[in-house]
Amino acid sequence: MDLTPKQRAVWQFLKDYRREHGMPPSYEEIRQEFGFASLNSARKHLLQLHRKGFIRSPWKNQKRALEIIEQEDAPKAATLPLLGTVVAGVPVEAEEVPESIDVPESLLKRGEHFALRVTGDSMIDDGIFEGDVLVVQRASTADSGATVVAVVDGEATVKRFFPMGPQASQGSSPNGEKIELRPANERYESIMVDADSVELRGVVVGLMRTFG
């Protein structure tokens, strides 16, 4: 069963922590790692992992009661081009660097994909942190509210996409309307631009994170 990007990030943290420390992290350590407001927020994600068969007993009160289930069928990997960095903050110039990275095929949708590494903190409330690698499905349209990689006047950024005006709908392309590129951090303001100033490069469909 597929995980959301944030659920996959939590599961990866559980595995990496156990590999390094010989035991799973506590709920408090999970809360601190992801900046959750409460232990209940951390527990909510763990319960989803339990329901999808990735961990056992996330509801127990013991300090380290998590049992991580190793998947018998390891996910197959696909090699994607790593096209530099994208800022979750103030936009920066888009980079195209001839590197590559292996990602689980389970993160991929139909069509062509690429990867970008995140700098900045404007998307932290959506679980996107500096150093994360985003898996992006190439697209020139996106549903309202989707997390996209957009180029504004030659500068690339990752934000939530909200077309404005009578043409706004699912599968919108930035044509003849205003576009709001909304951060997921109250410290940042939305970027409001004319549609003809925005080029959608793709929709974020996955996230990978390494620790240590």
Image (tube, grey):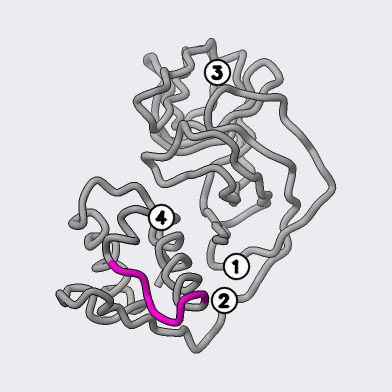
Which secondary structure lies at badge 4?
helix
Residue 77 placement, left or right of 9: right
Residue 66 placement, left or right of 200: left
Kindly identify the residue that appears in the image at 34 percent across and 25 percent down.
186
Q: Nearer the viewer, residue 103 or 21?
A: 21
Q: Main secondary structure of the magenta part?
A: loop
Q: Quadrant of the C terminus?
A: bottom right
Q: Are marks 3 and 1 in contact (CB under 8 Å)?
A: no
User: Mark 1: few, some, or many residues within 10 Å (few <14, many ≥20)?
Assistant: few
Which residue, given by chain and number where applicable, does mark 2 sit on? 75
Q: CA distance from mark 4 to mark 1?
A: 17 Å
Q: Which mark is residue 115?
A: none
Q: Quadrant of residue 117?
A: top right
Q: Which mark is residue 6?
A: 4
Q: Amino acid at mark 2?
A: Pro
Q: Amino acid at mark 3?
A: Asn
Q: Disc 3 or 4, which lies upstream in sequence?
A: 4
Q: Is residue 209 above or below residue 92?
A: below
Q: CA distance from mark 3 to mark 4?
A: 31 Å
Kindly identify the residue that appears in the image at 75 percent across and 52 percent down.
81
Q: Is residue 116 above or below residue 198?
A: below
Q: Nearer the viewer, residue 48 or 113?
A: 48
Q: CA distance from mark 3 to mark 1?
A: 32 Å
Tell me which segment is drawn in magenta: 20-26
Which residue, given by chain and number where applicable, does mark 1 sit on? 105
